[in-house]
Amino acid sequence: MKRSVSVAVLTLIQLMLAVWLAMLVPVGVAWLVLAAAALLYGLFLFLSPLRSFTLLVAVILLHAFSAVAQGWKFGWDVGTQFQSIVLQLVVLGLAAASWAQAAELRRWARQYEEAQRQIAALRKMDEAVSVLSANEFKDRLKAIVVSLRRRNEPGVIIFVSIPSHVFGFGGRRYTPEAVLQVVGETALASVRDQFDIVGRISPSTIAIVLQRCDREGAHRALRRFHWLLLRQRRLRADAVMSWVCVEDLSVFQGWPAVEALLEEFGADDAVSVRRRGG
């Protein structure tokens, strides 16, 4: 809102100076000055902040020296010099207002681009749990399945399906979101950074993908997961471990088989899915 007001005020100043300029000089000259101002405005938008400011200073100095040279050459009297000073101030004010507005719009554009990048990043993450969103998790898993199949390497996927009612120490009841937050943080701390992935595939299910890992490696990861759960004092570690299900990644059956597995555990009734691998 503040930035919009600033741009509007600068636009109003430019319009007032343009009208004043039209009153001081012939119409043809006024149009020529406005065309030059429009060209400068485009350059101010295109150039970097430092270069645009340098250009503004150069224009001001050139214009001032030009006016002084004309006054000395033609021997202007006091009245003519005063009119020239007023004209120079209007022209330079127009240039300065154009530079300020261009700088404001450039900052606005940078903030918009940064906001778009942040939005794009947030779309890849589940904001509530701080793990990958379902779509981003599937995209990365699909690439992992292709890579594992090409290298003939094993992979394991671990599902942690959260029941709707969870009680922690002291009989305290936790919401599913709070439980998912604890499970997500613990899962991220249990896996290999930049190698394994953790995502939320449904409102009640966290999935962990372990690359180049067999069942034995998965159980080592789960032991670390369990150990980290024991260190926190919100949820009962044994209760969380009872929600865990380990499945082999069927990389040689292709992506459809893996996707079907995700859909099975990502269903609303995922908690009641039979623990075939756990």
Image (cartoon, helix red, strand yellow):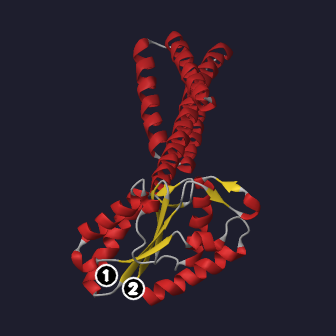
Q: Kindly identify which numbered label has been placed on residue 83.
A: none
Identify the residue shown where x is 51% and y is 52%. Answer: 118
Q: Kindly identify which numbered label has been placed on residue 212.
A: 2
| Label 1 CA crowd tier, 10 Å (few <14, some 14–19, many 20+) | some
**Real-space Cα distance between discs 1 and 2?**
7 Å
Q: Kindly identify which numbered label has been placed on residue 148.
A: 1
Residue 12: x, y in percent?
56, 19
Residue 91: x, y in percent?
55, 25
Mark 1 and mark 2 in contact? Answer it, CB < 8 Å: yes
**Looking at the picture, which amino acid does disc 2 mark?**
Arg
User: Can residue 153 be seen in this snapshot?
Assistant: yes
Residue situated furthest bottom in the rendering:
216
Quadrant into which the N terminus falls: top right
Image vertical order of residue 239 relative to residue 56, above or below = below
Q: 278 or 12: nearer the eye?
A: 278
Identify the residue shown where x is 58% and y is 44%. Answer: 53
Instruction: Determine the secondary structure under disc 2.
Output: loop
The image quadrant that residue 136 belongs to is: bottom left
The image quadrant that residue 78 belongs to is: top right
Looking at the image, tell me whether mark 1 or mark 2 is earlier in sequence order.
1
| Label 2 CA crowd tier, 10 Å (few <14, some 14–19, many 20+) | some
Residue 255: x, y in percent?
26, 69
Residue situated furthest right in the rendering:
170
